[in-house]
Amino acid sequence: MLLALALLYAAQGVPFGIASEYLPVALRQQHYSLGMIAAVGWLQLPWYLKVLYAHVADRPEIRPISRQVLLVLQFALFVVLTGFAIHSFAEAPRLWFVLTFLAALFASTQDIFVDSLAVRALAASQRGFGNTAQIAGYRLGMLAGGAGLLLLIAPLGSRRAVLVCSSFVLVTAVCAFALRDTGGESEAPTSRAERRLAARALFKHMVSAAARPVVLLALTYKLGLHMAAFLIKPIVVDAHWTETEIGYAVVTAGTTAGLVGAVAGGALHRLVHERKALAFGAVIQSLVCVPLWFAHALGAPHGWTTAAIVAEHFVTGVGTTVLFAALMSATRKSDAGLHYTLLTSANAVAIGVGSTLGGLLADRLGKGAVLAIAAILCLAPLYLVTKWDGAMKASADEP
């Protein structure tokens, strides 16, 4: 089951790899400002809005056909990604922007169904490595969508490189058959009025005094690191790195380090108390901003910058895995589709806000100042971590 989860999450990672790894390079090469590059990140808006319909995965008439829904979504995602092959980004940037938005829509919807199945099927002892499968799979997809384009465009051309990436999504669709909903009978309301009342009740529950630290942690845990990570590609592009150099160092080496970090994060979550794992992740996220600052200050020398990128991606893998495993612990199984989506969407909002802040502040204050601010922000969630045990139980409705 873990392998199936990893490959389904990998399919979601392909369009995000195109949007977050390839597009920033292409945009900077076309002389877009850092603020504009950050603004393009809001084409991932469906990831933030999926909370509006996430309850669909919990409905009793939908749960029995969840795997069929996944197959349809996978095929739709394949069709959209194939559309990138019509023209290169330089020839049709508007087409790429539209397709990027549609890809985010189908990938985020697929994520709702995969997440709800994972929450119901994974035992507490499996959540660490279950989220390793999630993060590692997602980064594998980002590797295919990011490095796949950056490295394959030169030898294959834009069209063939895109088709290789989209074919990967089509192949992973068969993994939908390996998933099973083992969470018992659905108690989801059936009428629209009942669903509206249930959603309101869940929201009130999430923002109650006892459970509120969970939501706040989801919003802030990775905000600082997202600000720092956004600057990596502008730093190397401004230092005149080639696409091949960026593909190997920023995407391939970095994403591989992220895969290793996800495994380490899964082990950390299993071996130590969840609160301690969260605290450790916050501290190392702050520390990893320091070598990035030196990489910028030194003019992005290849050796040091590659090492800094590898460290950042490794730490991101650790932190994201620990955070998502903790959020899974704080999710009510009866509302798994909607509740977990709300929590992870808070982290998605942090990606958009962090990237936007990083770009806008870097245009005004400089990249070095933003990296220093990011290091400080990474430590801010430690206060919330001290409240985790009680907040997690309150959020999950555990005694």
Image: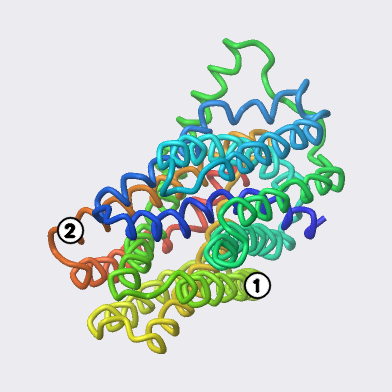
| SS at badge 2 | helix
Q: Is residue 180 left or right of residue 347?
A: right
| SS at badge 1 | helix
The answer to whether residue 336 is visible is no
Quadrant in which the N terminus appears: bottom right
Q: Nearer the viewer, residue 60 or 11?
A: 11
Seen at 48% across and 51% down, the residue is 19
| Residue 61 position within the rendered picture, expressed as x and y whole percent measured from the top left | 78, 20
Q: Determine whether 18 is above or below 250 in the image.
A: above
What is the number of the mark on residue 363? 2
Mark 1 vs 2, N-terminal side = 1
Dot 2 amino acid type: Asp
What is the number of the mark on residue 263? 1
Q: Nearer the viewer, residue 291 or 204?
A: 291
User: In whole angstroms, how far apart are the C-alphas of marks 1 and 2?
Assistant: 36 Å
Mark 1 touches mark 2? (CB < 8 Å):
no
Q: Determine whether 65 is above or below 232 in the image.
A: above
| Residue 229 position within the rendered picture, expressed as x and y whole percent measured from the top left | 38, 65
